[in-house]
Image (spheres, grey):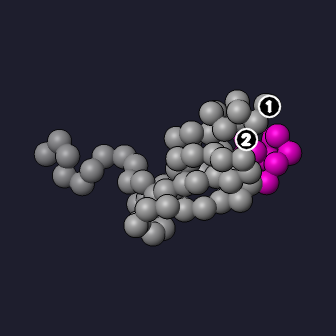
Amino acid sequence: METDALAKSCLGLPLAQALELFSAAGRTPDIKFTGERAAGEDLTPRVLVVRGNTVIAAWFRDGDPKGEGK
């Protein structure tokens, strides 16, 4: 997979899924986190940007917010 295509295909993906794509392309990227949130049970690391061999990710709350729909 071409580098630009790999970078574009990873945007927004959970980090684990993006790392599988990198692995399939024979690459092991550096990972940097941004933002104020730290890892937590209810948070998912997602890819924000891919610059060269660096994946920049942040932690997001996935799923329904608590109390929604009640």
Q: Residue at the spot x=46%, y=58% of the render?
A: 59
Q: Earlier in the sequence, mark 1 or mark 2?
A: 1
Q: Secondary structure at mark 1?
A: loop
Q: Residue at the spot x=55%, y=54% of the render?
A: 57
The residue segment tinted magenta is 20-28
Q: Residue at the spot x=66%, y=38% of the render?
A: 7
Along the line of sight, the residue nearer the viewer: 38 or 62: 38
Figure quadrant of the N terminus: top right
Q: Based on the displayed image, in which of its 4 quarters is residue 5 positioned?
A: top right
**Residue at the front extreme?**
52
Left or right, 69 with reference to 41: left
**Residue at the right extreme?**
26
Q: Secondary structure at mark 2?
A: helix
Q: Is there any visible trace of residue 3 in the rendered image?
A: yes
Along the line of sight, the residue nearer the viewer: 21 or 55: 55
Gap between marks 1 and 2 measured at Cα? 9 Å
Mark 1 residue type: Met
Residue 10, image x, y percentages: 62, 39
Mark 2 residue type: Leu
Magenta stretch encompasses residue 25: yes
Magenta stretch encompasses residue 26: yes
Q: Which residue is mark 2?
A: 21
Query: Do labels 1 and 2 touch, CB within 8 Å?
Result: yes
Residue 42, image x, y percentages: 41, 60
- Residue 35: image tag: none
Residue 69, image x, y percentages: 17, 42
- Residue 1: image tag: 1
Along the line of sight, the residue nearer the viewer: 62 or 6: 6
Residue 44, image x, y percentages: 48, 55
Vertical position of residue 43 compared to residue 11: above or below? below
